[in-house]
Amino acid sequence: MKFMKSLFVPLLINIFIINIFTGCVKKEDMTEEFKRFVKEYEAKAVPLFTEANTAYFNATISGKEEDYKKAADLQVKLSKIYASKVDFAKLKRFKDSNTIQDEQLNRQLIKIYNAYASSQIDEKKLEEMIRLQNETEKKFSTFRAEVNGKKITDNEVENSLKTSTDSKLLEATWSASKEVGGVINDNLIKLVKLRNEAARELGFINYHEMSLKLSEQDPQEIENLLNELDNLTRDSFAKLKNDIDEHLSQKYNLPKDKLMPWHYENRFFQEAPKIYKVNLDSYYKDKDVVALTKNYYSGLGLPIDNMVAKSDLFEKEGKYQHAYCTNINKGKDVRVVCNVKPNYNWMGTMLHEFGHAVYDYNIDSTLPWTLREPAHTFTTEAIAMMFGRMASNGQWFVDVVGITKEEKDKIADESFKSLRLEQLTFSRWVQVVYRFEKGMYENPDQDLNKLWWDLVEKYQMLKRPEGRNKPDYASKIHIALYPAYYHNYLMGELLASQYYAYIVKNVLHSEDLKNQSFVYKPEVGKYLLENIFKPGTKYYWNDMIEKATGEKLTAKYYAKQFVE
Ligand SMILES: [Zn+2]
């Protein structure tokens, strides 16, 4: 999922009337003034927002220099709106006055204030940051790993890591894929320092702290949550990691202590190796993944045909190699970018991205523009993840893929174990990314290669290649381009479990937490629509969660599902 920060240039001369006679401003005056402010703000931001999103979408599809330039220019323009010192001073006054009482107006004030606050950066610095980001993004999009003189795509890298049993080739492929880290590392460090300088100018300790606070997250609460999860998952993960090593040791005919990071079937060990016999890819190899996704959402009463038609779902030369969903106009123009292949990974990704899409698409269109977005980036991740998980759910295979009950009995247990393994593997990986980023922003001049591998050893329990001293952290696109964001995926997983448990118990009135596919359950769609999608970001995220599930965000349903 893409995360775009906005910034920018006032197109109108702001007329701001200060009540100089009384020296204090009446509540109604302040409210009226703020309403006027919002109107002017929307007049500037709304059209540019749509234009910038469209240009970005086009650039990621074509991969062309001029398209990326157009997208970057528009983003700079949009950014400048939020960079206005004059407007920010007004917002600060509205906020400090504490007189905006109307709930929706107050909510808009918080959202708009935070958007401006993160952009109160020297204009030159800001432009430099955006250009660096776009340049880095392009380097990622167009980088191809070179193995034995042959350039290969990310899909081919992943495929090779999964299927080859030749340790030499695996090491060469893994190392080649890490070269992108060296390509973008200078840009990354420049970006980190620029971001930090900017954050300090705004009164924050560093960029990491600023990002969390301005996205309505308390750094201490996040830290507590991650520590709690570390404690909850450590022992189970250590056991499973041993199972993984037993399996890989046989696969490669190597002693366990000779297993290296390239043996884990993934560039980052962010996904689990396939240690169980069940091969989910085989169930999708003859399937039309796009059609399955369409039918599934249609059965929930959340049709996606309109969005599929606008999306770009298959591989192309030069095209962005990852997947994302974008709400072009905070309305009904919602698009997804994928590089679909008929396999388990892309089935899960399609369900995931269209989870974002149905959320965006069904937000109440009568809400003010500012509130027409998910309650938080991680609450939309939660929906995307809840649906993404279905791609390995035994019941889903019966209901959607069309396997028999007997076949399901064979695969259900192992596919659940696979999901659990994936979850725990992923949760350990997020520990690495979150703590690395926190450390990097606290001190970008430290030995980051060491920090990275120390964390990888501690949380993922992998062995660092002897003598390796390369910026491997930089080969992960999120580190440079979606900073201080990764923990949201984990919070999304926790919330996905919370939503799922709530739906099973209270919407489907079932005690069976495992065998649920939601296939042809329009009541599930209706629940999501009314309680989660429609409200947009009308409420603070934890209030929305409490209204929808009766509880604030908690890790207990995740633990119940995957640890106990
Ligand atoms: Zn996502």
Image (cartoon, helix red, strand yellow):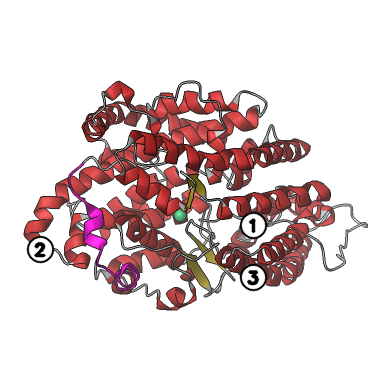
Instruction: Read off the residue under disc 2.
Output: 404
Say what secondary structure mark 3 lies in. helix
Q: Residue at x 47, y 26 (%)?
A: 455
Residue 522 placed where, x, y %? 29, 71
Badge 1 amino acid: Asn
Q: Cβ of disc 1 within 8 Å of ligand 1?
A: no
> Most prominent secondary structure in the magenta stretch?
helix
- Mark 1 or mark 3, whichever is nearer to me: 3
| First to last magenta residue range | 276-296
Q: Nearer the viewer, residue 101 or 506?
A: 506
423, above or below 156, in the image: above
Q: Which mark is residue 50?
A: 3
Q: Which mark is residue 106?
A: 1
Does 193 sit left or right of 400 as displayed?
A: right
Q: Around disc 3, counting alpha carbons within 10 Å, would you say few (fewer than 14), some (14 to 19), or many (20 or more)?
A: some
Q: Nearer the viewer, residue 101 or 451?
A: 451
Distance, label 2 to label 3, CA atoms, is: 46 Å
Answer with the quarter of the image where residue 219 lies. top right
- Of the numbered discs 1 and 2, the one sitting upstream in the chain is 1
Badge 2 amino acid: Thr
- Of the numbered discs 1 and 3, the one sitting upstream in the chain is 3
User: Count of labels shown?
Assistant: 3
Say what secondary structure mark 1 lies in. helix
Q: Around disc 2, counting alpha carbons within 10 Å, would you say few (fewer than 14), some (14 to 19), or many (20 or more)?
A: few
Residue 223 placed where, x, y %? 50, 31
